[in-house]
Image (tube, grey):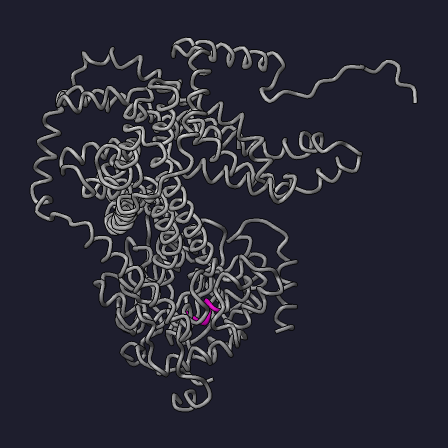
Amino acid sequence: MNTAGYPTAWRPPSFFGTRGRQRLALAGALAYLAVSIGTLNIDPQRVLAGVGRAIDLFGRMIPPDFSRTGLLFRGMVESLQMAFAATLAGVVLSVPLGIAAARNLAPRPVYLAARGLIVVGRTFHEVIIAIFCVKLFGFGPVAGLITLAISSTIFLAKMLAEDIENVRVGPIEALRATGAGFGQVVVYAIVPQVLTRTTGTAIYRLDANVRHSTIVGIVGAGGIGHTLSASFSRYDYDFAAAILLCIIALVALGEWFSDWVRRRLR
Amino acid sequence: MTADLAARYPTIWRRRSRRESVIAWLWVAAVAAASVWSVSALDIEWLFFRDAHEQAIDLAQRMWPPRWSYLPQVVAPLIETIHIATLGTAIGVVFSLPLAFLAARNTTANGFTWAIGRALLVGSRSVNTVIWGLLFVAIFGPGPLAGIAAVAARSVGFLAKLVAEAIEEADRGPIEAIEATGASTWQVYLVGILPQVMPVLIGTTVYRWDINVRESSVLGFVGAGGIGIYLYASINQFAWQQVAVVLLAILAVVIASEAVSARIRARIS
Amino acid sequence: MPAVAAEGRGPAAPGAALLTIEGLAKVYPGGTQALAGVSFAIERPEVVAVIGSSGAGKSTLIRCINRLVEPTAGSIRLGATEIVGLPAGELRAARRRIGMIFQEFNLVDRLTVMENLLSGRLGSVGFFAALLRRYPPQDIAGAFAMLDRVGLAGLHDSRADALSGGQRQRVGIGRALMQNPELLLVDEPTASLDPKTARQIMRLIRALAQERGCAALVNIHDVALAQGFADRVLGLKAGRVAFDGRAGELTPAVLTDIYGAEDWSQTIRRADEEEAAV
């Protein structure tokens, strides 16, 4: 075949549209890298020194010290209890808030207020909420419980509101047409549509709460977090390693359990 | 007429079989038992709740009006927070790709490497960013370097898990086609698999960046840089009007990052 | 097939028509006048098709009769009961006497076929009985019999979303008939179905209405289908009744009046074939 006259060079189209824009994006990224690293005062010496310290640290972490089982066990159990109770509270409290945040159920001012509350609540990290709860309720797991309950309520309410807004109107109309009462329409037309997803979301939240329950202790709100941060401050790295392994095990278990239940629910 | 019907057709119907009913009740009992256990063991001072709302209102009043003069001091740490999130996510992406290939059943070398990949995934994802922060502060000392490492460590597992799932679900067709040309394994990965998982990778990266901005706002609590330390200090000094300013600043940044993230993800899909 | 317990029928006044509509009007909040004074009566159990172009008011008419849409003016009498202005409790009692069948079937997807059928009896059981799915034995027998009658025997424990479109509409028909109604309101029952299934469904509706001795008011956009399965046809145009007569009296002139100019001879010829087939 005669290939004379055809171009001999070809490059694939870039992600950014034109070649020029791709170069611009690359230049922008490099510039950002330079500026940010400069602003943060990160010098390579610290990084290297860190590597050395990391090796030293891991050396001290092995073997992990599981001897203080009482402390370990109590902390983990406390975290678990906080997570579970907070999820329960969240499920219960999310119902009114979720209904209030559903555009098709709530009157407009109520809807706006509820949605506003949800947006603000989601923005702040659990640790920030934890600090405020510690200030209000003192140190200990109660503050942690309330922190997680608040964040769970906000999250579950948002999901519930979305489910309610997506509910199909047809079956509701059909059941009203048979002469069914309001409660019956809710039980037969709305609950079946919403219940499965709500249960799945609650399980997902339980798993998330188990994760968060391990860190609220860092600011004094109970659970294993406090034990962990204390062990780091005291350079008890082998104990810290033990705690870390327990946390990983607990969280991994929780996630596996959550996946299993949600698969069964389908 | 009715008796005639009743004679020819069943008059009993149950929504759940006996076995299903028992299982359902067992779940209810389990949840009830767990609830009682968790609530009772926590020794909740129900008395607290009575005046808690008063205290909350008192607190809100003390935070008003926000001390706007504090705002300039907060700008640099805010920018630092965003840098920590961005750089951490970027490093996370770089490491997540090889980890994803390691943890995906169809691209990993053997069962052993797959197990290692999975273990690294679980390890990275089960440890909170803040806890990674504790660890890296011990390694690198306090400052944003520890924060970046913490964000990266948490993000690697998050991203790699989702990309690994995308790799496992990748369409066999293009992969087989490239294998049939006699390409090497790496070339198959590059041309057959990578383009398929790119959308997932990019979308997930943007999503994680948005979450990381939120997480970076509290890394300062453990000394890993960002605005967290200013919030912590203000609260401990009971400087509530300063606290209000910091909270509002964090609110603005997180909402902005969520908006940006949503825009980009909408553009992609 | 014998009907399930004939309760719930309204007071029988001598000479009262099954359904009387007078001057029914509906203006939507935006200003659209969907119905501009509709009047007709259904004296005896017959199948009445309602035809008309989109926007002529067919859907509004059907939904006004059981007040899923509130009429702006006019009177609706089911037997001797005036429906407009009824308070909530009595409205529910009136709705029990009217069965409704929908274009999109409107089953509760996650519930089983049996639960969907029994939901037709919700108006007659209390809240807790409904919650616990404890229905009276004659209702259960009636539901099984209904399943048989609509051709879905054995599917009582299948989830509604596992069925085909035609099967779902059969459940919808069964649910409406579980109420043992005096009147069936049918809103475009075949619009979401393929042509063959559509004819089967229309055949089923017509047969059941005749067996149960209830009148049926059927919105339908397919004129041939209307002519093939209805006794009487109401033609709506711009919110008024433009034609009210026997199915055989539909001429191309009438159709032009209702829908606009077209070659209507084709439609009429197909309808004649439908009649022959039925």
| Quadrant of the image occupied by residue C176 | bottom left
Task: Look at the picture and state if A30 lies above or below C161.
Answer: above
The one of C190 and B164 positioned closer to us in this rendering: B164
Please give left or right for residue B98 compared with residue A61 in the image: right
Instruction: Please say if C71 is above or below C158.
Output: above
Dominant secondary-structure state across the stretch colored magenta? helix
Instruction: Tell me where residue B77 appears, x and y as whole percent.
Output: 31, 15
Residue A25, quarter of picture: top right
Which residue shows up at 66% across the image and 21% down it?
A13
Measured as percent of width and height from the top left, residue A232 is found at 31, 30
Find residue B210 and report its horizontal and vertical position in percent: 40, 28
In the rendered image, residue B98, in percent from the top left (x then y), is placed at 58, 31
Check the image and name the residue furthest to the right: A1
Nearer to me, B225 or C273: B225
Q: Quadrant of the N terminus of chain B?
A: bottom left
At x 55% / y 72%, what residue is drawn?
C203
Which stretch did the figure color magenta? Answer: C171-177
Write the residue at 44% across / 9% down.
A35
Residue B132 can be seen in this image: yes
Left/right of residue B222 with respect to residue B59 in the rendered view? right
Tell me, yes or no, whether the highlighted magenta stretch contains residue C130. no
Q: Is residue C81 visible?
A: no
Tally of numbered discs? 0
Query: Measuring 59% from the left and 41% from the top, which residue is drawn there?
Result: B114
